């Protein structure tokens, strides 16, 4: 049953600010739901809200660095309290060991490096607590880069100098660079600089759904050539231009087929964005993952489905280690 590696969720913030129960809760993800849905490893993002979100989450008086520590402390406590069921994995070997012990793996990641505030030692700190993948940016400008924008000029701004240095540092530390939310100019800088495979942890195909958060055919091709991975986001606004607040399995399959065609089957994974999205889901929550996997069976072979579900991400992780 251990099968799914999901590249992105916002469950830490959901638990911190909405009081969701990490073990038995009714958010998209809980320990019970991970078990029921066939999780092998879940990437848990420490997300630092910026702009309006900071206010919406009641964090307007909390500094970015402090916010990062809140996420870190919550994760650490959740791991300690539930070590009989889930453990932090820092390496592929950890994931394999946990699996053999019948235990879920939790991979710590970062969404938005704004908390770094131009201080390289904070990237070192992230590495030291076991962060394995780091998103350079969220929806507002930070010390590294500019976010995706509908304005073509803003969308093509490159990485800042500190962002370029950070890419090299992340490579050196074996941390996967996550380009979801990054604008296209910054993306091409990452591709030029990185010596290791990257991830777009929760992004979809722009040709199917024209949103600047999604990846163009050229970007998909580049991620394929880089040996990287794209995790399909389950948010309806990135899957379907009709924006009907409903996520269908058919839309996910459509993006999967398209991304596999443009980037190659090796570059495909899942990045649900669970607990960070508000569209109504045909498959309800993490427990519905088997329904998505079943729907892929009409399109992909069993070996290909294993790649999408977990093998591709394990390879990217290993190649970064």
Image (cartoon, rainbow, N blue to C red):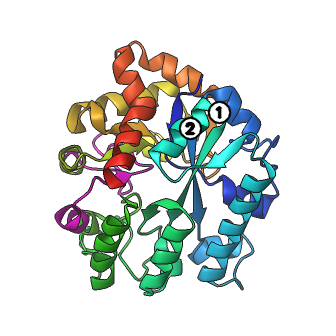
For the image shown, how many numbered marks are present on the structure?
A: 2
Q: Position of residue 294 (x, y in %)?
A: 50, 16
Rendered view: 162 above or below 56: below
Left or right: where does residue 282 sit relative to residue 320? right
Indicate yes or no whether the magenta region holds residue 203.
Answer: yes
For the point 53% across and 70% down, the residue is 128
The answer to which of 135 and 54 lies nearer the viewer is 135
The answer to which of 277 and 228 lies nearer the viewer is 228
Give the Cα distance between marks 2 and 1: 6 Å
Density class for disc 1 (Cα within 10 Å; few <14, some 14-19, many ≥20) is few
For the point 82% across and 40% down, the residue is 24
Q: Where is residue 54 in the image (x, y as percent from the top left)?
A: 65, 75
Magenta stretch mostly in which secondary structure? loop
Rendered view: 187 above or below 1: below
State which quadrant residue 74 falls in.
bottom right
For the point 35% across and 19% down, the residue is 303
Residue carrying label 1: 101
Highlighted range, magenta:
188-217
Pointers 2 and 1 in contact (C-beta within 8 Å): yes
For the point 40% across and 41% down, the residue is 313
The answer to which of 121 and 292 lies nearer the viewer is 121
SS type, badge 1: loop
Residue carrying label 2: 97
Rendered view: 295 above or below 282: above
């Amino acid at each position: 049953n251990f099968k799914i590696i999901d590249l992105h969720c916002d469950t830490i913030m959901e638990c911190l600010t909405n009081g969701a129960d990490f073990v038995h809760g009714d958010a998209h993800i809980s320990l019970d739901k991970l078990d029921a849905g066939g999780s092998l490893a879940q990437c848990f993002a420490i997300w630092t809200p910026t702009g309006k979100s900071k206010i919406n989450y009641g964090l307007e008086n909390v500094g970015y660095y402090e916010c990062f520590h809140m996420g870190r402390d919550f994760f650490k406590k959740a791991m300690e309290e539930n070590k009989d069921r889930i453990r932090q994995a820092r390496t592929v070997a950890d994931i394999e060991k946990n699996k053999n012990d019948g235990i879920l793996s939790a991979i710590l990641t970062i969404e938005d490096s704004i908390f770094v505030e131009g201080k390289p030692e904070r990237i070192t700190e992230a590495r030291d607590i076991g962060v394995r993948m780091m998103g350079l940016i969220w929806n507002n400008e930070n010390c590294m880069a500019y976010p995706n924008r509908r304005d073509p000029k803003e969308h093509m701004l490159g990485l800042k100098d500190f962002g370029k240095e950070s890419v090299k540092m992340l490579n050196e530390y074996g941390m996967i660079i996550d380009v979801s939310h990054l604008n296209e100019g910054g993306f091409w800088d990452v591709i030029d600089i990185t010596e290791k495979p990257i991830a777009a942890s929760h992004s979809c195909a722009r040709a199917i759904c024209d949103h600047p958060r999604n990846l163009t055919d050229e970007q998909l091709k580049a991620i394929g050539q880089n040996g990287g991975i794209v995790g399909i986001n389950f948010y309806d606004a990135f899957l379907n231009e009709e924006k009907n607040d409903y996520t269908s399995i058919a839309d996910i399959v459509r993006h999967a087929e398209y991304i596999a065609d443009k980037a190659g089957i090796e570059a495909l994974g899942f990045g649900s964005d669970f607990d960070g999205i508000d569209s109504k889901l045909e498959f309800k929550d993490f427990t519905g993952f088997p329904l998505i996997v079943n729907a892929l069976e009409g399109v992909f072979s069993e070996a290909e489905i294993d790649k999408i579900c977990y093998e591709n991400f394990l390879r990217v992780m290993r190649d970064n280690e």
